[in-house]
Image: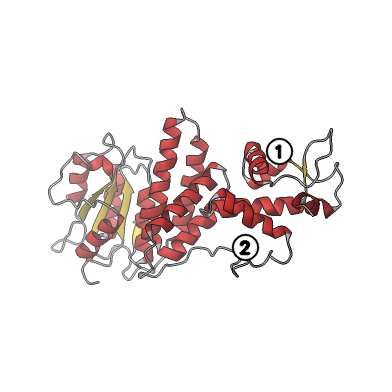
Amino acid sequence: MSEGQHRGQDGESAGTGVTTGALARRLGVSPTTLRTWDRRYGLGPARRDPGHHRRWSEQDIAVLAEMGRLTSAGMPPAEAAHQALKLLDPATAADGADGSVTGPVAVPRPRRSAPAAPKPSPDAMVRRRKGLSRAAVRLDAPTVQDLLADAVESHGLVTAWQELMVPTLHAVGRKWEESGDRYVEVEHLLSWHISRTLHRCAADPKDPAPPGAPGADAPLVLACVPGEQHCLPLEALSAALGELGIPQRMFGAAVPVEAVSSAVRRTGPAVVVLWAQARSTASVPLARHIADTRWGVRGARGRPAVMLAGPGWAGPAVRGALRPASLPDALAQIGRVRGPA
């Protein structure tokens, strides 16, 4: 019995089932992708009655959903199709011939990752990047979220950011530029889900010292400079600090100068991180102003170390400012400033 005949046993008539357009929206892929999977790999609808639109049964949909899950995980499409079609055979639906699970697998949600998370092999991370990019291009939001969560769970937040999130964002950005402003929606969806993952990873450690108490345990201040809306890397730093249990106050995008100054005076942070993505937003006078901001009581006043983070600070120079080259570098420099505490 052929696979098409096997699938046709669901008993649905030509007037029932899901249309191609509805299925494409349901799975987060384009109708063209469904037609391609049908033509190349035989993942077509169970019934093909002349004079009617294609109709997809729930069994068809399960196979296609598995195809999407496997390709998003980095499996080559031909192999993914072969595995997905096993769902039609009860003998192999649960386990492959080699004993591996081929059915849908629940992906764990992010948690505070262990500091000693295993470093992924280069090939494994390439597969993850390809899978994440494919899911984003298909606008498959659930798969994007699961892949991000699994990467954080498996390798830790910092590695997931450095090796998966940033390279995939850059790849999608290049695709956007090369295609004449197409795929803008892909970049927005991917950015939003990365931000969501970072927020879910960020713990809320109890501050060892109350706000206003100066010292190494006072919360750090994280802010984008005025006019800077690009704050995703700052969110990554905030989440990484949260994993380490380091208290901080995240103020987000385009923070006015006086708001940053006020936050410094009120909290007495050891470090103030100023993020600038573009050179047009980086301001040396602002950095110097924050570096000169004092906090504490008379006779015991202190001032923060200023960290200039982001490519916007490539040109300006501020004496004594910290200049991290990456997220791990930023965490290391903050650790040295704060000391053993």
329 relative to 119 in the view: left or right: left
Q: Counting other residues with Cα less than 10 Å from the Cα at mark 1, is it few (<14), some (14-19), or many (20 or more)? A: some
Q: Position of residue 169 (x, y in %)?
A: 42, 44
Q: Position of residue 74 (x, y in %)?
A: 51, 53
> From what the image shows, is residue 226 above or below residue 63?
above
The amino acid pointed to by label 1 is Gly
Q: Quadrant of residue 52?
A: top right
The amino acid pointed to by label 2 is Thr
Q: Is residue 273 visible?
A: yes
Q: Is residue 203 visible?
A: no
Farthest residue to the top: give it. 180
93 relative to 207 in the view: left or right: right
Q: Residue at (19%, 53%) from the top-left corner? A: 322
Work out how far the residue at label 1 is from the one at label 2, CA to CA, in angstroms.
Answer: 27 Å
Label 1: which secondary element = helix
Q: Position of residue 336 (x, y in %)?
A: 20, 64
Which residue bears the numbered disc 2? 102
Task: State which mark lies toward you, 1 or 2.
Answer: 2
Q: Residue at (41%, 56%) from the top-left corner? A: 123
Q: Counting other residues with Cα less than 10 Å from the Cα at mark 2, is it few (<14), some (14-19), or many (20 or more)? A: many
Q: Residue at (49%, 63%) from the top-left corner? A: 110
Which residue bears the numbered disc 1? 21
Label 2: which secondary element = loop
- Judging depth in this view, the residue of 25 and 336 nearest the camera is 25
